[in-house]
Amino acid sequence: MDMQTSFLDRLFESGLLIDTGIDGLYGRSGQFEEVIAAFERLIDKVGGGDGAEAMRFPPGMNRAFFEKSGYMKSFPQLAGTVHSFCGSELDHVSLLQCMEVGEDWTKGQEATDIVLTPAACYPLYPTVAKRGNLPKTGGLFDLQSYCFRHEPSKDPARQQLFRMREYVCMGTEEHVTDFRQRWMERGVEMMKAVGLEVTIDIANDPFFGRAGKMLANNQRDQNLKFELLIPITSSANPTACMSFNYHQDAFGTKWGLNLEDGSVAHTACVGFGLERIALALLHNHGLDTVDWPESVRKALWG
Ligand code: ATP
Ligand code: ZN
Ligand code: MG
């Protein structure tokens, strides 16, 4: 049995995660949720003075916005769409017959106008664009959403439905890169406060296919993505628990996000992987939060 399986098994045995029979789709216990709630309060405390506008979207987004985002160009392998039965009574009869004999009943399902949100910030850009030019101070938003990615895995830190807390900044290049830098420093401090050893490294997104290799290399060469890494299932390959992304003016151009003077906005986002942070805490401090070091408990629960 490798380390990964055993950590997942221990999480199941302790009841912190609840097996659904699907890799990467888990229920969470009250104690697990308490850890996430406490860490989110810490995020609120650290980011609270910045005056971010809070918005919460459900875990599904407008399919038209999803299509326009270009997600299917970059990450078709990760996307999840919502399909429904839209047929007649007769179609219903054949659907049930199909299920009865164990054939593929999903073939007749039709795409709805909703797709599963792949990252918390995706519904934000078209929403802000609709408002017109940004104010002089730019834009700062506080988001949290369940996100879907079709990447089933036995690694408990790689889930198919997980929560991402994000801050998104819109403004000039200098404004948004300062924002990103500030959160890298804050991220390191926050993890230190809860007793976690971290490193920060340059990173890239898993762009699909051969053309994607080029996009990934370009992203790295231009320092567009950094990750804050914490050992969870392997110390040789620590897990990304936060990411810090600078989009240049790509989203500004795509969505028509403009500054007060009409110039295209640059954007950056920082994301906290909430399940991963909870897992990092549980892995490092033990599966019972009562036994965690006093300093860690104090940082989380006061
Ligand atoms: P990875 O390289 O591990 O796949 P990522 O680069 O795809 O991560 P982002 O797209 O930057 O991650 O997402 C923001 C944050 O969401 C990550 O830093 C991570 O903490 C969390 N996250 C990403 N994918 C998952 C997942 N499958 N399960 C749990 N958390 C995730
Ligand atoms: Zn984002
Ligand atoms: Mg990924």
Image (cartoon, rainbow, N blue to C red):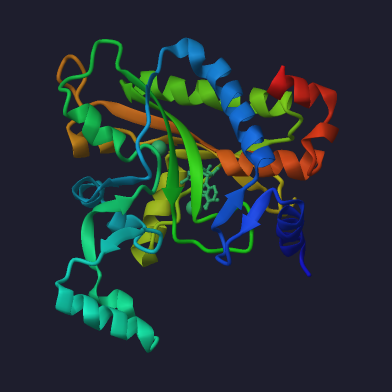
Q: In the depicted view, which residue is nearer to us: 89 or 301?
A: 89
Q: Is residue 23 left or right of 252 when viewed as pictured?
A: right
Q: In the depicted view, which residue is nearer to us: 83 or 65?
A: 83
Q: In the depicted view, which residue is nearer to us: 64 or 235?
A: 64
Residue 260 lies in quadrant: top left
Quarter of the rendering occupied by the N terminus = bottom right
Q: In the depicted view, which residue is nearer to us: 84 or 168?
A: 84
x and y percentages locating residue 35 in the rendered image: 66, 34
Image height of 300 relative to 153, above or below: above
The residue located at (47%, 26%) in the rendering is: 180
x and y percentages locating residue 119 in the rendered image: 40, 44
Image height of 204 relative to 89, above or below: above
The residue located at (34%, 62%) in the rendering is: 76
Image height of 114 relative to 281, above or below: below
The residue located at (50%, 42%) in the rendering is: 163
Q: Is residue 117 left or right of 131 when viewed as pictured?
A: right
x and y percentages locating residue 36 in the rendered image: 61, 34
**Can the viewer see residue 185 in this picture?**
no
Q: Is residue 176 left or right of 202 when viewed as pictured?
A: left
Q: How many marks?
A: 0
Image height of 251 relative to 9, above or below: above
**Can the viewer see residue 189 in this picture?**
yes
Residue 38 lies in quadrant: top right
